[in-house]
Amino acid sequence: MRTAYTSDQIRTAERALMATVPEGTLMRRAATGLSVVCAGLLPGVYGSRVVLLVGSGDNGGDALYAGARLARRGARVEAILAGSRTHAGGLAALLDAGGRTAGTDVIEQADLIVDGLVGIGGAGELREPYRTLALAAEGAPGLVVAVDVPSGVDASTGRVDGVAVRAQLTVTFGACKNGLLVDPGKSFCGPVELVDIGLGPYLPDPDVASLTDDDVADLLPRPEAESDKYRRGVIGIVAGSDRFTGAAVLAVGGAIRAGAGLVRFASAETAVRQVRNRWPEAVTTVLDGPSVAEVGRVQAWVLGPGMGTGEEAVALARAVLATDEPVLVDADGLTILANDRALLRRSAPTVLTPHAGELSRLLDVPRERVEAARMEHVRRAVAELGAIVLLKGSTTLIAEQDRPVRVNATGTPWLATGGTGDVLSGIAGTLLSGGLSGYDAVSCAAHLHGLAAQAASTGISGGHGPIAAMDVATMLPQVIRSL
């Protein structure tokens, strides 16, 4: 499992470690690792032109010491001193190694630009001259490497207020920071290279975590010799309507392809007919009122995709949420909840899977605020709504009270197409009915969903291209087998 931490957690661990080692040890370790990564990015260190953007903090010192190492290997290293003060030892080391200070005009000639302007303590908008240097680096032809975190990205939350350095690679020290995994900050980082400086024994429980393939493989339910369809998990899906039938077909498809023991589907007659035609494996019920008693026994429910938000849909949502089974609520179900949050007062687990717009309605805040501070708002949703929350988006976040926020690391931008969320609901509902907790079910579902999308979008030539929602469902058995 990949873990990440807030700035305060990192600083506390650094202080504990520094008390046990000679002064300057951590900076030397960081600078050595940074210089090795930078050297590997250059076609040849000797004769290459490296520009350091140096701020007032310790990461400016890291950049200077790394620059000194590159200068001793023959690189032409020039430092733009942008802060109100400069790390004296780092600057002396650079000058002794043959490096020099320079003006901003050298940025355009650099093969490699090292961003050491603002470290993990930075928050809010970049001030001048940092803002201008960040924009100059983005427009320059050289590769940009961020030191610890791209300047302008909040290391604890991933928030970006205004301009930030857009790096092609981020070299981070000791442990990963939350903001390197969560958008919008993640989109400024490029790949993240971790340099071990010895923090491991001093780190607390993580603030953020990301499941790996092995983690998901360990969590996934596996049928045993004595398994039958009921022991494997029975999922009830209430989705679709006479007007919207596609969401129902996709949610049921996600559930079946994810390995449900049995899918019980209930909806209006038109939606039931479409599901019967596409998925004869599902046991279907045409609903003739707000009761779901006739559907039969299930271990978990999926509620909402395509069901509408009229009076009949609201009554049906009340009936499902009044049951004693776990319920995953998506799409139209979330709109119903936003209009009546009292429906969330239930003893059984509730899982919500909103995108930013749906979460903005649930919390009554502008969508832009949710997108700018995804971590903050997914945690707020858990606290206010008393549910497990999966916030969809370019970075999918999963949160439960008193647990690390999980960041899904799989997927592709091609997932941004209609119906893929319905497939995700079916996958998560299947895992929920199979005995996983809501937190684990949606975490594993998001991981599988992303892997299936990646597999579906990969063409014969190895490139990537458009996918449809059903393509994701179709690839699920192959992805699960691969794990």
Image (tube, grey):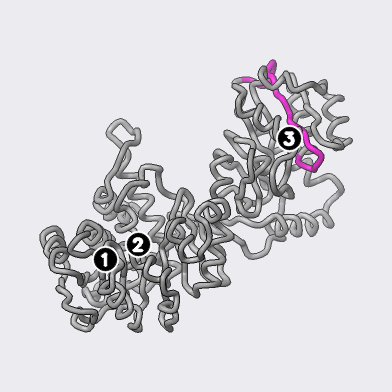
Q: Marks 1 and 3, how far apart in space?
A: 50 Å
Q: Position of residue 58 (x, y in %)?
A: 79, 43
Nearest to the eye among marks 1 and 3: give it: 1
Q: Position of residue 73 (x, y in %)?
A: 73, 22
Q: Residues within 10 Å of mark 3 (few under 14, many from 20)?
A: many
Amino acid type, residue under disc 3 in the picture: Tyr
Labels 1 & 2 near each other (Cβ < 8 A): yes
Q: Return the residue nearer the eye: 49 or 244.
A: 244
Which portion, as a residue range, is magenta?
44-59
Q: Earlier in the sequence, mark 1 or mark 2?
A: 1
Give the residue number, with chain letter if any, for mark 2.
331
Give the position of the C terminus as an image quadrant: bottom left
CA–CA distance between discs 1 and 2?
Answer: 9 Å
Residue located 26% across and 77% down the image: 231
Q: Which mark is residue 247?
A: none
Q: Residue at x 32, y 38 (%)?
A: 458
Q: Dots 1 and 3: beta carbons under 8 Å?
A: no
Q: Is residue 49 magenta?
A: yes
Q: Amino acid at mark 2?
A: Ala
Q: Which residue is mark 3?
A: 130
Residue 307 tag number: 1
Of label 2 and label 3, which has the lower sequence position? Answer: 3
Residue 336 against residue 73 in the figure, above or below: below
